[in-house]
Image (spheres, coloured by chain):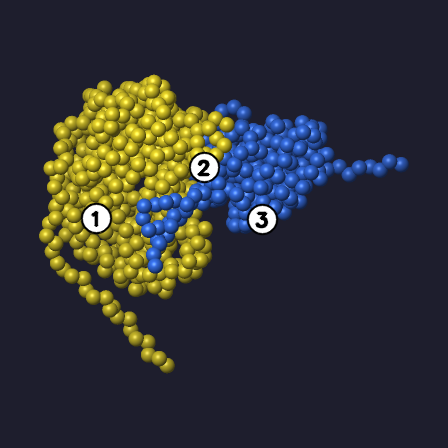
Amino acid sequence: MAQVEKRVSNLPATFEWEYAPAPEARDIVQIREQYGLFIGGEEVEPRTKEWFPSISPATEEPLFEVALAGEEDVALAVDTARNAFENGWSELAPSERAKYLFRVARLIQERSRELAVAESLDGGKPIRESRDVDIPLAAAHFFYYAGWADKLEYAFPNRTPRPLGVAAQIIPWNFPLLMLSWKIAPALACGNTVVLKPAETTPLTAMIFADICRQAELPPGVVNLVTGDGTTGAHLVRNDGIDKLAFTGSTEVGKLIMRELAGRNVKLTLELGGKAANVVFDDAALDQAVEGIVNGIYFNQGHVCCAGSRLLVQESIYEPLLEKLKRRLSTLRVGDPLDKNTDVGAINSKAQLEKIRELVASGEEEGAEIYQPKCDLPERGYWFVPTLFTNVAQSYRIAQEEIFGPVLSVLTFRTPDEAVEKANNTPYGLSAGVWTEKGSRILWMAQRLRAGVVWANTYNRFDPTSPFGGYRESGFGREGGRHGLEPYLRFDE
Amino acid sequence: MTRLSVKKTYKLYIGGAFPRSESGRTFDAAGQNVARASRKDARDAVRAARAALPGWAAMTAYNRGQVLYRLAEMMEARAADLEAACSGRSEVEAAIDRTVWYAGWADKLAQVLGSSNPVAGPYFDFTIPEPTGVVAILAPSDPPLLGLVSRTLPALVGGNTVVVVAGESAAIAAVELAEALATSDFPGGSVNVLTGFADELAPWLAGHMDVNAVDVTGVEGPTVELERAAAENVKRVIRADADSQSPWEISRFLELKTVWHPIGP
């Protein structure tokens, strides 16, 4: 009988070494003390006379003050957008509309360094991500949809596309400029005008975008920005002058919006929460899978609606995979978002940090086993150590609820059928990941996963040409690609 | 001596069978006693539709197209009965022709509605349409037969399973259509037909947590309460023309799935 050798780790220990600080220069952004609302091409003071601070989550320092838009401000923005729609923008030659959008794309590229630093300062995400992902993709989005503006009739055979009118748009704080671009670029390309509400905690790049609109000489009123909190968003949803509402955010708020818009003739698209499964089969390339798992859940501090927050591992590779994963976790650098070596930045806000802590505590209480690498965190600011839970049952809150933080729940499966069953066992359906070297299994899984985006042997990839959006309670409508035009059009048939 | 004819009982069509309403209720439609479905019948129909979904959705598009074509054949064979249940010959002909038209769409949808996406990186990326799931259809009463066909077939051809509630004055047409459906190789439960009072059944279907989309085209008057109920599980709410024919009607009942894979040696 063959001797069974006891499993010993043959992975080398990770190095304990110090990185020299590599801070990105902050002075490229000229932050003003106060930013008003952007309505009709001008900065205006809020009728509410109220302002609120935007805090740097990495240092807790107030960066600037921004206007709190009330009902009257929102109404003014919607009326202004309506006026711009009816008096100019909707009659403008589509090829001219295209050129405005190309201008915007170019300006984002030109000011990309400034925008990247601003994004990391205001929102806490690592400069590596804002510089290499958020801002280039934002520019690419405008460039892509610019080209559609004068080709819409080719996108919808045998239909006559028409703009809707005024598009109201509400975006989250996790990818501020990128979400703004996902919303504004297709809306304008289709001939609509826009009132957009940036997220409460991350208005800075939107304020710079207002300046980009001026530089692009975009006609006044085509883009209007109303800053504020949830009450501002509610005023925008309730305003009866809007023709379209696009919302990206939580499923809870998405349902409120659906109820609010019931019986009203407002075209609605929702991009809501997720609890994506990242499924790793025993034949997967493990080192690549580990990178994909890490990118899936720790990218942007896990503040990603499509984050791979549930890891489903085939039982036979559970131990070696977890060993590699824990080792990789210990090499993640958490800290100053403006440091170019930082992998995981600051949690976006105090409220979000508390939510993550609460859910993590529930995981421990319910019986899951927590693992956190040793990690020195800065004294000030909002931080959370990259965390993984093993011994997680499907019924635990950490396996059902969206945490929106750097917290991974690990579950196991034996057969492909069981993997599908567990992966689909949430009310969500935004995204999923599959790791296997077997081509037929990838397609088999891709067919069965109830999710709008399936990443096979990769994770968290985005592109303006690639439609993105959810099944089931993750919302409806697509952003990106030819399909991303439809939410901003009506059709004369 | 003249022969006494055998008269038909007008029943529901659930899970491939023709039950009476569990409530034992009927109502008078054009002089006939027709089953008046209860909320429990509606729930049974949803359960049958959910159970039939994996099979119907996984069927090849070619096969689904043939099943729809078979429906046209069965409708043609029952043209006289259908004619008596609607506005007449021309409506029946239009309904049959529309069925053939939708049958032909089954294996073209992915090509017309899907895409290959030229992403800026070494990835193969494509988008395909997939069924939304279980669809509840509150069908229009007018035109009786064509309204049922125009709302139900776009949902079915894309791979959804359906619970359709016929308008009160379309009840006879619905039963005749159900009998054609039953002989067309539709798997039991893939399409379920309820007769009764739509306003009684609609709230239960709109609020049902295992229904993925609700078509309110046939609802007369405001749909506010139905839409609010639909929000509970983010149902797709669909409102269309009672008599339309378009691939875009099919796409209302579809989701889009995007798949990425790296390209490398």
Between A7 and A367, the residue placed more toward the observer is: A7
Is residue A174 shown left or right of residue A21? right
Q: Quadrant of the N terminus of chain A?
A: bottom left
Between marks 1 and 2, how big is the CA–CA gap?
36 Å
Q: Label 1: which residue?
A: A344
Give the residue drawn at x 30%, y 54%: A292
Give the answer, above or below, for where A203 lies relative to A70.
below
Give the answer, above or below, for where B155 lies relative to A50.
below
Give the answer, above or below, for where A78 lies relative to A470.
above
Give the residue drawn at x 40%, y 51%: A423
Query: Which tint was used for chain A?
Result: yellow
Q: Can you give x and y, in whole percent of width and height, for residue A67 in the image?
A: 21, 26
| Residue mark closest to the camera, 2 vs 3 | 3
The amino acid on which the numbered mark 1 sits, given as a three-letter code, is: Val
Neighbourhood count class around disc 2 (C-alpha, 10 Å): few under 14, some 14–19, many 20 upward: many
Query: Which tint was used for chain B?
Result: blue
Is residue A89 shown left or right of residue A345? right
| Residue mark closest to the camera, 3 vs 1 | 3
Give the residue drawn at x 35%, y 28%: A95
Q: Secondary structure at mark 3?
A: helix
Using the rendered view, name the quadrant where residue A81 is placed. top left
Q: Secondary structure at mark 2?
A: loop
Between marks 3 and 1, how big is the CA–CA gap?
50 Å
Between A466 and A390, the residue placed more toward the observer is: A466
